[in-house]
Amino acid sequence: MFFNNLSGDLSSVRCIWLTGLSGAGKSTIAGQLHQRLSAQGLASCVLDGDRLRTGLNADLGFSEADRIENVRRVGEVAKLMAEAGLIVLVAVISPYREQRRLARGLFAEGEFVEVFVDAPLLECERRDTKGLYAKARRGELKNFTGIDSEYQAPEAPELRLSTVEMDAQTCVALVLRRLGLTD
């Protein structure tokens, strides 16, 4: 129901790429997953889209070209961090399938796990504490994913987490269990 294509062996996984709409729960799941991996003695880091946009990607807007460059940069940083021995937890909208495919291509077979953090647009809007969806609907925020910019859901992610059906702790537990790590 929620799993596809995942080998169940964390020894080769270097990047867990969480994709989904704004408000779907990517950052929450990545943060909790980071804590759980750390508690098991595994070195990991979180690359969060919002944080990266205030530093590394501060020069980028939200046009299609800028979104493509954003994901390219995140993929390159994830690869460098993975080469340094970290399990990299990427939490970015990454709206285009092709860019996620290119990010996957930076890693060897089995090192990259795509996780679709799935929540319907209306639920993401309901959860929006920053009011970004409302601004986008009023036309005050252009190129907002899900409103006036396309989000291409993964066609065959290794893992799909419905954050309407499950809370973040359950999602994290499922990721860990599927990777062969349990408390």
Image (tube, grey):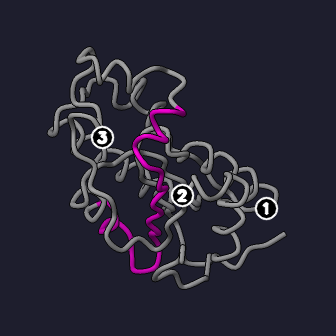
* Residue wearing tag 1: 41
Q: Which residues are magenta?
A: 103-127
Where is residue 121? Give x, y as percent: 40, 43
Residue 122 colored magenta?
yes
Quarter in which the N terminus is drawn: bottom right
Amino acid type, callout 3: Gly
Q: Which residue is mark 2?
A: 84
Q: Is residue 130 magenta?
A: no
Closest to the camera, between mark 3 and mark 1, is 3
Q: Which mark is residue 146?
A: 3
Query: Which of the two labelled residues, at mark 1 and mark 2, occupies the earlier sequence position?
Result: 1
Give whichever of discs 3 and 1 has the lower sequence position: 1
Number of marks in the image? Answer: 3
Pick the front one: 116 or 80: 116
Q: Can you tell which of label 3 and label 2 is closer to the viewer?
A: 3
Residue 96 at what x, y percent from top left? 24, 53
* Frontmost residue, 30 versus 84: 30
In this picture, is 136 found above or below 2? above
